């Protein structure tokens, strides 16, 4: 009987330690967009700026504020995790792979499952929040759904990707 208690106590200790670790990373926070520090990100268009609001885009979860200049296009691509977008300002022409383009503006919301192709073009100075529940990545695709380089994807739109060495 005593042997059964040891594993149960060990599990309780592990759960308590995990809970304390989670609490220390889950502190309340308030930010205003004027405080955001925007940076360029390799493999994404030069006309896009990113500010991490919460979490770690290389880790498990993140919230990022994204600014796109007027006319900026992020060509057809997909992500390994689901993506949620909430639009703050501007108007974006948003297209899901195989679907019609739709305009999304301030207050709009878009959800894309993992591996679902989509592209967006900013009509007039766009800002939106992106929520990812996994590491951030981007895979550009052609019309047939085959993966292509960022340079090939952006060339058709007159865009250039930020190079990895520029960072």
Image (cartoon, helix red, strand yellow):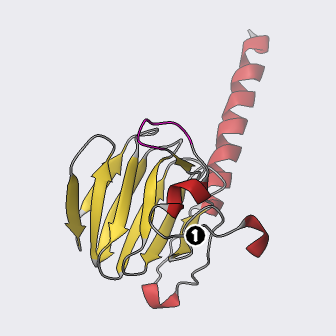
35 horizontally vs 19: left or right: left
Residue 101 in picture, x, y percent from top left: 23, 55
At x 60% / y 59%, what residue is drawn? Answer: 151
Q: Quadrant of the C terminus?
A: bottom right
Residue 47 in picture, x, y percent from top left: 51, 77
Q: Quadrant of residue 46?
A: bottom right
Task: Out of 133 and 6, give the one closest to the viewer.
Answer: 133
Residue beneath label 1, please? Answer: 160
Task: Out of 70 and 40, give the one closest to the viewer.
Answer: 70
Residue 145 higher or lower than 136, as above or below = above
Query: Farthest residue in the bottom direction?
Result: 34
The secondary structure type at the circle numbered 1 is loop
At x 56% / y 62%, what residue is drawn? Answer: 26
Badge 1: residue crowd in 10 Å (few <14, some 14–19, many ≥20) = some
- Is residue 27 visible from the viewing direction of this image? no
Residue 36 higher or lower than 9, as above or below = below
Q: Which residues are magenta?
A: 142-147
Residue 80 in the magenta stretch? The answer is no
Residue 153 in picture, x, y percent from top left: 52, 55
- Is residue 66 visible from the viewing direction of this image? yes
Residue 146 in the magenta stretch? The answer is yes
Q: Quadrant of residue 163?
A: bottom right
Q: Quadrant of the N terminus?
A: top right
Residue 43 in picture, x, y percent from top left: 62, 61
96 horizontally vs 3: left or right: left
At x 50% / y 67%, what residue is drawn? Answer: 64
62 horizontally vs 33: left or right: right
């Amino acid at each position: 009987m005593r042997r059964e208690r040891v594993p149960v106590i060990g599990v309780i200790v592990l759960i308590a330690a995990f809970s304390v670790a989670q609490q220390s990373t889950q502190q309340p926070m308030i930010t205003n967009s004027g405080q955001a520090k925007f940076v360029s990100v390799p493999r994404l268009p030069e006309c896009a700026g990113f500010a991490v609001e919460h979490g770690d885009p290389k880790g498990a979860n993140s919230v990022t504020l994204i600014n796109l200049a007027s006319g900026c296009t992020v060509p057809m691509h997909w992500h390994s995790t689901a993506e949620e977008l909430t639009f703050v300002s501007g108007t974006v022409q948003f297209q899901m792979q195989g679907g019609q383009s739709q305009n999304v503006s301030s207050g709009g919301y878009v959800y894309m499952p993992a591996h679902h192709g989509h592209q967006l073009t900013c009509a007039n100075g766009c800002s939106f929040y992106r929520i990812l529940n996994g590491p951030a990545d981007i895979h550009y695709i052609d019309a047939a759904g085959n993966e292509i380089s960022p340079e090939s994807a952006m060339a058709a739109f007159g865009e250039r990707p930020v190079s990895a060495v520029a960072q």
